[in-house]
Amino acid sequence: MRESELNSAETIGLKALGWLVGHDDLLPVFLGASGASEGDLREGAGDPVFLGSVLDFILMDDAWVLEFSEAAGLAPEKLIRARQALPGGEAVNWT
């Protein structure tokens, strides 16, 4: 993976984190599902693995994907590509 792809993916992850923090209804769900605390959010902003978990969470619901994509001015497919570029997002082949 090229460094520019990782930087772009991290930027999308940061935008996703900002979007999530701005949603009082979704943030507690993310915190409960991830086990993160509100204090972990600031620290996690610099962690590509944490940003990947934010994208994983948003990607669980098509409505969240569409809402975030519209707010960020991104094609929904960019979220999937960003997730794949971050640690833990590699495609798994079971063959």
Image (cartoon, rainbow, N blue to C red):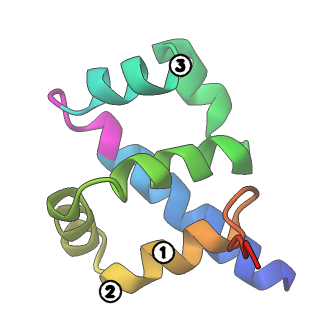
Which residue is drawn at the image coordinates 59% and 48% (left, top)?
51
SS at badge 1: helix
**Residue 7 percent location from the top left of the image:** 72, 71
Q: CA distance from mark 1 to mark 2?
A: 10 Å
Q: Is residue 78 visible?
A: yes
> Is 61 placed left or right of 45 in the picture?
left
Which residue is drawn at the image coordinates 64% and 40% (left, top)?
50
Q: Callout 1, which amino acid?
A: Ile
Query: Which label is found at residue 80?
Result: 1
> Is 3 placed left or right of 46 in the picture?
right
Q: Residues within 10 Å of mark 2 (few under 14, many from 20)?
A: few
Q: Residues within 10 Å of mark 3 (few under 14, many from 20)?
A: some
Q: Quadrant of residue 27?
A: top left
Q: Label 2 belongs to which residue?
A: 75
Start-end of magenta stretch: 20-25
SS at badge 3: loop
Pointers 1 and 2 in contact (C-beta within 8 Å): no
In the image, residue 83 sits, relative to residue 75, either above or below, namely above
> Is 43 placed left or right of 31 in the picture?
right
N-terminal-most mark, 1 or 2: 2
Please name whichever residue, 63 or 91, is drawn nearer the observer in this view of the structure.
91
